[in-house]
Image: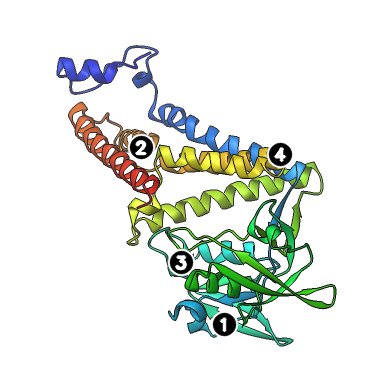
Amino acid sequence: KGEDSYRKALEQGLDEFPRDPGSFFAASPLKRILVALGGPVMNVVFAFVVFTAVMGVGYRYDDWGNRVVLASGYDGQSYPADQAGLRTGDALVEIDGRAVTGFSQVQEAFMLSAGKTLAVAVEREGLREELRIVPRLDRESGAGKVGVYPWIDPVVTDVTEGGPAELAGLRTGDRVTAVNGRPVAHSIDLVRYLEAERPVNAVLRLQRDGAEAEASLILSYDDAGGTDLGIAWSHQSVLVRSDGFGDAIADGFRETAGTVGSTYRGIGSLFMGVDLLKAVSGPARITWMVGQVATSGFSSGLSSGLTGLFNFLAILSVGLFAMNLLPIPLLDGGSIVLYLVEAIRRKAVRVKTVFRYQTIGVVAVAALFLLTTVGDILFFSGN
């Protein structure tokens, strides 16, 4: 009741909203704030329930170890990793006091810490060293970047049926030691060589069952210089699962709180000079991302597909919570600001003031939709 009070007040030129008994604007500002919080809070509740369920059931993901390869060795640029004294082959064992065992943890820590000084412990030739790294803001994604790749041993764990590797006779367990006479220490050596040289015929020298072997791959490349070898490299499968219902609830809460924090940090990065056309996704790109996550997950099985899909939906739900509570007119956060002002002043905000405030919100939201739509069009057109 009272849903049309705003329209009536404008049409009748009233200074205040009609406050018919039992209508929305007749309720106290506190009650209206609770109503406005209802939607965003349910977004968080949904995310918490999903994260708790996922942690209770458990899930697996593929990861690499904590050794790194410096990107500067391939493009000649200087990155925060180089400035901090990191070297190719170093194992990152601790970042800001948190133990690190896999590259996904390394990636997450750096991505969420653009501009922040991180204390990093590394193992190098059996010795532990302490370094300090300040991730650089990547203006295309809004994430922190230090300039490292994962060290992936060039050991074949699987070959794609009908792919170049299978046609060339590669087998599971083969270790690539050279390509066209160039030594290969890790997968990045091989990938970067192929991207730079684009050889149609790539002769791989292999170690197979303690003996030397060779395989010749016939390759094709996309416009960016990428090629699909049809090889899955050595990796580790990581199981994540809580030790009981109570732990699942605690882990679900931590995951939800962490996602909320990283979401607001991401929103904050939009004001640090990022490329908004690339860093902000619109409805079309978000829908495509949901499809990609589902497709990738279900290709590994029903359980992996459902886990990945619901995890992603929970992250989107937290994003809705964070955005809706921003003090922007038309959003729940903008309404809460108005009700707080009314509660402090003990006097209703004038209709004309609300109208001007909402007009700003319409322009802001329209601009946001226009921006994200243009960004989505550029993304799908390859630009």
For disc 4, the neighbor class at 10 Å (few under 14, some 14 to 19, many from 20) is many
| Position in image of residue 311 (x %, y %) | 62, 43
Instruction: Tell me what residue is drawn at x 81 percent, y 45 percent.
Output: 244
Which mark lies nearer to you, 1 or 3? 1
Front-most of 382 and 214?
214
Comes first in the chain, label 3 or label 2? 3
Based on the displayed image, in which of its 4 quarters is residue 167 positioned? bottom right
Comes first in the chain, label 4 or label 3? 4
Q: Quickly name the residue at label 4.
A: 53
Q: Quickly name the residue at label 1.
A: 86
Which mark lies nearer to you, 4 or 2? 4
Q: Quickly name the residue at label 2.
A: 340
Q: Is residue 207 left or right of residue 123?
A: right
Q: Is residue 114 left or right of residue 65?
A: left
| Position in image of residue 127 (x %, y %) | 71, 87
Q: Pick the quarter of the image with the N terminus.
A: top left
Amino acid carrying label 4: it is Ala
Instruction: Tell me what residue is drawn at x 39 percent, y 34 percent.
Output: 332
State the mark number for residue 114: 3
- Which element carries disc 1, helix, strand or loop? loop
Comes first in the chain, label 4 or label 2? 4
Front-most of 173 and 37?
173
Q: CA distance from mark 1 to mark 2?
A: 50 Å
Amino acid carrying label 2: it is Leu
Q: Is residue 359 left or right of residue 62?
A: left
